[in-house]
Image (cartoon, helix red, strand yellow):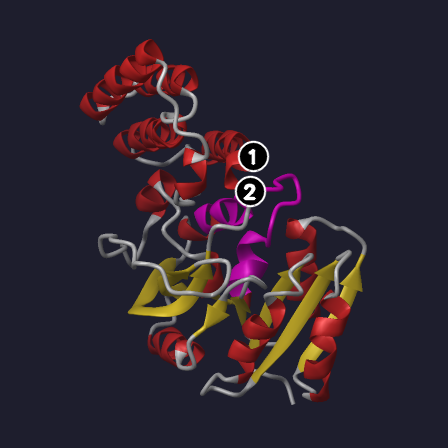
Amino acid sequence: MTPTVSVVMAAKNYARFLPEAVGSVLAQSFADWELLVVDDGSADATPAAVRPFLADPRVRYVRSDRLGQARAKNLGVRLGRGRVVAFLDADDAWEPTKLAKQLALLDADPAVGVVFCRRTLMDEAGNPLPPPTVPPPPRGRVLDAMFVQNFVCFSSAVVRREVLSHVGAFDPQWDLAVDYDLWLRVARHHAFDYVDEPLVRYRTGHGNLSKRLLDRVDTALSIMRRHGAGVRPAAVAEAYSSTCRTLAYVVRGSEPAAAARWYLRALRWPGGRVTAAKGLVAAAVRLATGRRTPGAAENAAENR
């Protein structure tokens, strides 16, 4: 029989986290799913970590050869058979009622193309971290809000397969922020909804954010340039300004000169100029006094 949900998990060198992720799928109260673990050329013990779970016929393991995250995810989508596609990163985990509660929202409104939920945070060892303080996310037609900030935790998203057929899956030209590009395409045509509960445990603190932060921001800016047409000018201005301010804030402690340049860039855009100006002063003070805070970027929240 064809399962209702295809869970796509692209994994690369996450053998140490994978059993918790896969186990959280097996623990779902909604059981009509298939799980496709796409191993994108892992050099660690990922095959051995998956092997015990293959006794369940709902779990499928596919080995690929370093496709990159967009192509690996697309492979999982293509191989899946469910009318709904759910995404789970191999370092995250779900609460047991996640799929059941999200499918109820999808079934209640045919206009909704994506359902997501809130998340809790855990450290690399799986210990809970203080919950993030975030405002209620938008629902419905969310293009402007999505352009300003990607508010959908990737491991929380479930999507109708027909939506992916309509707008396309992940664009292989992007190596980072591939979900941001996808959600912007979806948001032009389909509504979003969410379960207002933290049904995902999101692992943080192990992704070398400081080394890839500038690449992530450059990618986000490129995606914004692609999708800016049709977005309200105020949302466009806030998106560019907030992206520059966020990067400046993250590097302000360790690289005040770079932070000052990003704050100056943020000042080009209306909205947030007072915040940018204050940040610029703070960066200038750090630069003048020679104060540095190494590793500050590791504490940044991923928002693209």
Q: What stretch of residues is rendered in magenta?
A: 162-184
Residue 100, horizontal then vertical, whole percent: 41, 82
- The type of residue carrying mark 2 is Asn
Residue 117, horizontal then vertical, whole percent: 36, 65
**Residue at (50%, 84%) from the top-left corner?**
27
Q: Which residue is mark 1?
A: 211
**Residue at (59%, 83%) from the top-left corner?**
3
Q: Which residue is mark 2?
A: 208
- The type of residue carrying mark 1 is Lys
Q: Is residue 181 visible?
A: yes
The one nearer the camera, 38 or 130, is 130
Disc 2 from disc 1: Cα separation: 6 Å
**Residue at (33%, 21%) from the top-left corner?**
266
Residue 109, horizontal then vertical, whole percent: 34, 73
Q: Quadrant of residue 215?
A: top right
Is 180 contained in the magenta span? yes
Is 167 contained in the magenta span? yes
The one nearer the camera, 199 or 46, is 46
Q: Quadrant of residue 16?
A: bottom right
Name the residue furthest left: 274
Q: Quadrant of residue 128?
A: bottom left
Residue 225, horizontal then vertical, whole percent: 47, 29
Q: Is residue 206 above or below residue 52?
A: above
